[in-house]
């Protein structure tokens, strides 16, 4: 039981580090005044939004966050 708990703790640590790195690689949603002015062009290019790097990073953040939550619940049950 102790080895399983250690393995899940290590996985949770790696998942937490991955979340931190993914969030740091994401760009901001708007860059102040230039974000407000460039809003029209942003909606024009929105059809390819799912293929951008930011969209992939956002999806990875959601999956890593869900995995982190599941690992936390497993550790709580094993605790």
Image (tube, rainbow, N blue to C red):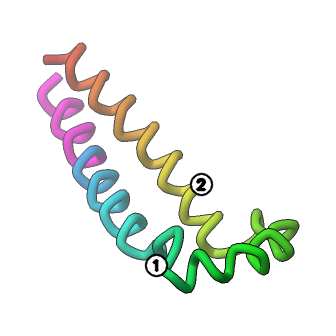
Compare marks 1 and 2 and give the one earlier in the sequence.
1
Question: Taking 75 as reference, is 63 left or right?
Answer: right
Question: Taking 27 as reference, is 4 left or right?
Answer: left
Q: Name the residue under label 2.
A: 59
Q: Which residue is drawn at 46% across and 72% down?
A: 28
User: From the image, which quarter does the C terminus lie in?
Assistant: top left
Disc 2, SS: helix
The residue nearer to you, when weighing 5 against 54, is: 54
Residue ranking furthest to the bottom: 34
The residue nearer to you, when weighing 68 against 42, is: 42
Q: Residue at x 48, y 54 (%)?
A: 61
Are there few (<14), some (14-19), or many (20+) residues within 10 Å of tag 1?
few
Frontmost of labels 1 and 2 is 1
Q: Residue at x 23, y 31 (%)?
A: 4
Residue ranking furthest to the top: 77
Region of the chain picked out in magenta, as a range: 1-11
Q: Give the prevailing secondary structure in the magenta stretch.
A: helix
Q: How far apart are marks 1 and 2 (CA)?
A: 24 Å
The label shown at residue 32 is 1
Q: Is residue 46 above or below residue 10?
A: below
Disc 1, SS: loop
The residue nearer to you, when weighing 52 against 64, is: 52
Which x, y percent locates residue 60? 54, 56
Which x, y percent locates residue 72? 27, 30
The label shown at residue 16 is none
Q: Which residue is drawn at 80% across and 69% down?
A: 43
Q: In this view, does 30 lie above or below 64?
A: below
Question: Cβ–Cβ below 8 Å for labels 1 and 2?
Answer: no
Quarter location, residue 3: top left
Which x, y percent locates residue 1? 17, 22
Which x, y percent locates residue 27? 48, 76
């Amino acid at each position: 039981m102790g080895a399983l708990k250690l393995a899940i703790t290590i996985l949770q640590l790696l998942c937490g580090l991955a979340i931190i790195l993914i969030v740091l690689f994401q760009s901001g949603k708007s860059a102040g005044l230039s974000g407000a002015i460039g809003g029209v062009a942003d909606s024009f290019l929105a059809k390819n939004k799912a293929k951008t790097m930011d969209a992939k990073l956002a999806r990875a953040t959601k999956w890593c966050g869900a995995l982190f939550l599941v690992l936390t619940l497993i550790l709580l049950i094993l605790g």
